[in-house]
Amino acid sequence: MQNTLVKNYSETKTNKKSFLQSKTNLCLYIEKRLNLIFSSEINRENSIFRKVKHSAIHKMALFLAGSITRSCSIGLAGETASGKSTIAFDIINTIESFADEYFIKNAITRINTDDYYYDRSDMVKKAGSFAEFAKHYDLDVPEALELELMKNHIKSLLFGDTVFLPEYDMSGTAVRRDNVKMAVPSKIIISEGLFTLTEKVVDAFDFKIYVDVSSNVQKERFYERAAQRNLGDSADEVYKNASDKAKTHIHPTAAMADIILSGESDRSSYREFINNILSLVKEIYFD
């Protein structure tokens, strides 16, 4: 049936117009096309995908067809230096470029999980430095973040409310300023972080993505970043703690994921895949 729908859709402009009037047919067509796009990437050498649930493709079709009319939310998680932030920014930049080209307002909003670390500036001052503070306070556990607040903010955006987000100072003060960044409801809400798929926040996301990376690549990236941040002799201790805590708090969240991405693919591959999805959007709504 789906092959017939695709054929009928493609035959003439008149058929295309009448076809689009049926949301059921449209959803079936979009899902068929999405399956082809995903299959092509999955079967490619050095694919960006390590796992894709069919239910995620079906849900994506529902959103793209307008069968689900609210905004959608995407959560990306993974270990430190897995590549999740880079992937998130590539997704955001690619979608924003498309939105600019077709004059789409409020296409995507980013929620930075790190901004929800609790303010511990008083403890840093008492310890004398962030390094001394970090010796006695574990930042590599979900309890270090106010994930319930993050979940509330995401839910508010999904239901059309403007919210004011916190901002955490990553320079070593452990200061969090609340209600400083305005976020407006957008078609897509995306968040990435170590604990984005943990228990207190995971059910805020329609699409749950885990970024997987080999230990060798992850370690190499970590130490490159440690050198840039002047961690010096403390890098080994920080890496060991992060790795140990990841086994307890991050690795298990992969089981919650609809999609598992390789954190080692070339950046152009992620952008190319998103552009393939956007080409389908262009065909349906702008051609």
Image (cartoon, rainbow, N blue to C red):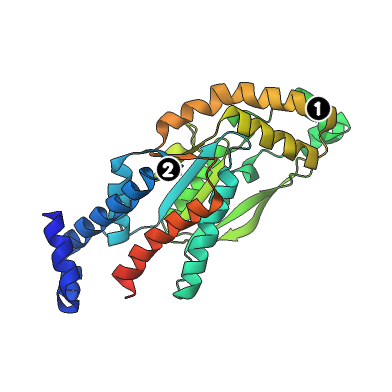
Q: Residue at image x 46%, y 42%?
A: 46
Q: Is residue 179 left or right of residue 74?
A: right
Residue 162 visible in image: no
On screen, residue 63 above or below 138: below
The amino acid type found where label 1 is placed reads: Ser
Residue 101 image position (x, y, % from top left): 48, 74
- Residue picked out by circle 1: 234
- Residue picked out by circle 2: 45
On screen, residue 213 above or below 59: above
Please rate how many residues cluster around mark 2, counting C-alpha atoms within 10 Å: few if below 14, some from 14 to 19, many from 20: few
Residue extending furthest toward the bottom: 14
Please rate how many residues cluster around mark 1, counting C-alpha atoms within 10 Å: few if below 14, some from 14 to 19, many from 20: few
Q: Residue at image x 48%, y 49%?
A: 154
On screen, residue 128 above or below 64: above
Residue 248 image position (x, y, % from top left): 55, 22
Foreground residue among 54 and 275: 275
Residue 56 image position (x, y, % from top left): 33, 44
Foreground residue among 162 and 168: 168
Q: Residue at image x 48%, y 54%?
A: 189
On screen, residue 161 above or below 141: below
Q: Is residue 231 left or right of residue 87?
A: right
Q: Quadrant of the N terminus?
A: bottom left
Q: Quadrant of the C terminus?
A: bottom left
Residue 246 visible in image: yes
The amino acid type found where label 2 is placed reads: Glu
Residue extending furthest toward the front: 45
Local SS, label 2: loop
Local SS, label 1: helix
Q: Residue at image x 45%, y 41%?
A: 209
Q: Is residue 85 left or right of residue 271?
A: right
Please tell me in which quadrant of the rendered image residue 8 appears: bottom left
